[in-house]
Image: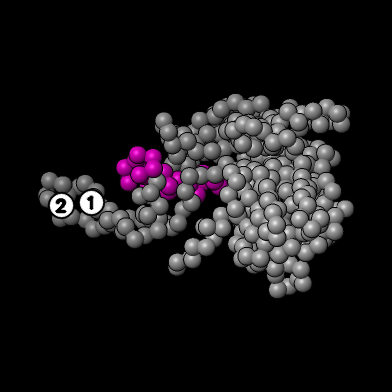
Amino acid sequence: MNRLMTLLVIPLLFLAIAGCLGTSGTAGEPSLADATTEPQLTPTPLDPDDPFVRDATSFAEHEGLSLEEAVRRLEFQETIGAIQPELEADLPDSYAGLWVEHQPQYRIVIALTEGNESTIQPYVDDKAWADHVEVRPADYSLAVLRNAQQEASRVAGQLNLALTTAVDVKQNRVELLVGNPDLFQADLAAAGLDLPPAVIILPIAAEEPLPETNQGVLFEANTADGRTVYLPKQPPVAESMAALMEGELIEVDGCLRVTDDNYKDGFLILWPSDSDFRVGGEQIEVLNGVGEIVARVGERLRLGGGAMESSRSMERFDEVIPGLAQTNCPGPYWVAGEIETLAEQAIPDIY
């Protein structure tokens, strides 16, 4: 698995359709005066246990709509989404994305670099929601944004950085998320590299202080008997994997590992970027970003994350954590995600 993460944000509708809603009814008895009028159908009452109705009810509450209006909008979803592949195929140089806005008023927005309502009329003319369509101008087509995203990932690879990229169709840009944007800009300049104009660099976290490096770090500490213990920390990342690992935290030749039945020495843990550790006497503890103990050698550990077992995936982390490949801490790697404190881990799960 390549840890150079990219996240393509495509236009998402608020709720997926969980089912179809139909109406049925019976005609009332017409009077002689009404003999020539069409009989009126009585809608079937909405079933609150129907998954579609539950979705519509949640949607209505979230957006402050009547249930009837929420049902109407959700029934549009399937045909709204269906035109996106057509627009991409027929208008590759101008189609810039589609999304639905529910506030302040209901709009199906289609962004184009050139063209207007008449351009998209053939695609929406027969749709029940055609009157709600709004065409907005854009600088970059969706194809250009996707190419810019790929180029941003390629450039980051040349700098041996792990980062996240996302196509934001509403803002008509590619967002590149990195721990410290200033350091990234300096690295780009030093390497003589440029990013496409559609790319904007943003910090992963808005709060200060920003991390001192965009790479991973290999911490070292000495035990009372003079041994070296290592704490490999991942680069700052916007997202993490969410598989679950449980085992005992052990130390093998100065490397902190979590036991696993498939490997003699278990997995070497690559800790989150804000981790720290404390080595005192015979005790080794790992701390989170606010100084709470999340792991202690010799005790059970439960943590999120994901396994890196292939040589290719491990080599990627050797690149972004300088010095890792030169230690005596071999893989496989467990790339840690969320880790509860030891106190929280001690609370038994209740199902």
Label 1 sits on a secondary structure element that is loop
| Residue under the point 87% across and 31% down | 191
Q: Nearer the viewer, residue 111 or 43?
A: 111
Determine the residue positioned at 71% across, 31% down: 181
Report if residue 244 is visible in the image: no
CB under 8 Å between discs 2 and 1: yes
- Image position of 40 with respect to 166: above or below: below
Q: Quarter holding the C terminus?
A: bottom left
Magenta span main SS: helix
Q: Amino acid at mark 2?
A: Pro
Q: Quadrant of residue 300?
A: bottom right
Q: Which residue is denoted by mark 2 in the rendering?
A: 30
In the drawing, does residue 326 fall left or right of residue 230? right
Q: Is residue 87 magenta?
A: no
Residue 73 covered by magenta stretch: yes
Residue that protrudes farthest toward the bottom in the picture: 261
Residue 287 position within the rendered picture, expressed as x and y whole percent measured from the top left: 63, 50
What amino acid type should be assigned to the residue bearing mark 1?
A: Pro
Q: Nearer the viewer, residue 10 or 263?
A: 263
Relative horizontal placement of residue 290, taking residue 249 as reference (left or right): left
Give the x, y percent position of residue 49. Answer: 34, 61
In what element is the residue under mark 2? Answer: loop
Q: Is residue 277 visible?
A: yes
The residue wearing badge 1 is: 39
- Residue 81 or residue 24, whichever sits in front: 81
Q: Quadrant of the N terminus?
A: bottom right
User: Alpha-carbon neighbours of circle 1 within 10 Å: few (<14), some, or many (≥20)?
Assistant: few
The residue depicted at 78 percent of the width and 49 percent of the height is 220
Number of other residues with Cα within 10 Å of mark 2, as a class: few under 14, some 14 to 19, many 20 or more: few
Magenta extent? 60-84
Q: Which disc number belongs to residue 215? A: none
Q: CA distance from mark 2 to mark 1?
A: 7 Å
